[in-house]
Image: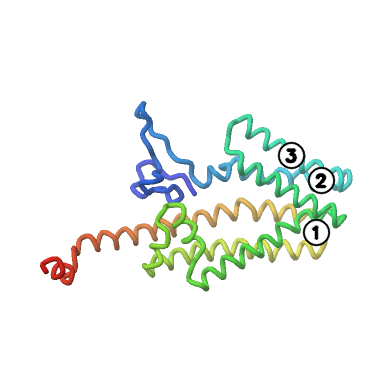
Amino acid sequence: MVVTNSDDAVPHPMTPSTPESTAEVSTPEGVEKVAPTVLEQLGGLSGLVYSTLPVVVFVPANSYFNLGVALWAALGVAAAVLVWRLIQRSPIQPAISGFFGVGICAFIAYRTGDAKGYFLFGIYTSLVYGGAFVLSVLARWPLVGVIWGYLNGKGTAWRRDRSAVRYYDVATIAWAAVFGARYVVQSQLYDSDQTGWLAVARIGMGWPLTGVALLVTLWAVRRADRTLEVESNADRTDGPRPSDQTDRST
């Protein structure tokens, strides 16, 4: 998730490194293309910043005008971000998801007739995500390990190593803490009708906390990959078991 130095011997933790989906491929001209990281697929740092713009516009528009103007302003900003990314030929999936997310938030605010309803979807989404991450740890299937195993093409091989499972537990708990904190803080602000502070909390607990969770995930994934690599090398060094040699001789 975080761009590393090209001299780093450890593969980028969010770029698949299997033969079927390598991080770097050689072009006919001999120029290497680097597969997009998950951060880039999320729109990069600019995408994380763009995701806060509808909220930044929504609250002042609601204060100075009315709810209807604020909702259209937020939708307009989300649409403008989508168009801008199209013009730049940047990945548009994050912008499309963001536009639909703003649409859902705007619909809830319209139906409730209250500006704070704009934040309700995000509050309960954080609760659901946080619960899912906690349950995955309790079930010994930490979601970070499941997701990373899918991305790098190694499946569930990591579950055979207890150390790798523990590292993925740490990363998964970090994400659960982020989602849990968002729910607790923002639900309290929602109940106390603090719409302005809700916007501050949405931004302040958005990409900054996401960045912290990504750093923890980066550390955990690297540790887990190294552990699995050491175990794999040890298995190759030990060679065939005596029972295997006996079977071959017979």
> Mark 3 or 2 closer to N-term?
2
Rate crowding at label 2 as few (under 14), some (14 to 19) or many (20 or more) other CA atoms within 10 Å.
many
Of tags 1 and 3, the one toward the viewer is: 3
User: Measured from the top left, where is residue 193 in percent x and y?
Assistant: 82, 61
Q: Are marks 1 and 2 in contact (CB under 8 Å)?
A: no
Number of numbered labels in the structure image: 3
The reply, left or right, for residue 7 in relation to residue 179 is left
Q: Specify the amino acid type for callout 2.
A: Leu
> Mark 1 or 3 closer to N-term?
3
The reply, left or right, for residue 58 in relation to residue 1 is right
* Residue holding disc 3: 77
SS at mark 2? helix
The reply, left or right, for residue 200 in relation to residue 21 is right
Q: Are marks 3 and 2 in contact (CB under 8 Å)?
A: no
The circle on residue 71 is: 2
* Residue holding disc 1: 194
Name the residue: 56% across, 61% down: 175
User: Measured from the top left, where is residue 158 in percent x and y?
Assistant: 39, 63
SS at mark 1? loop
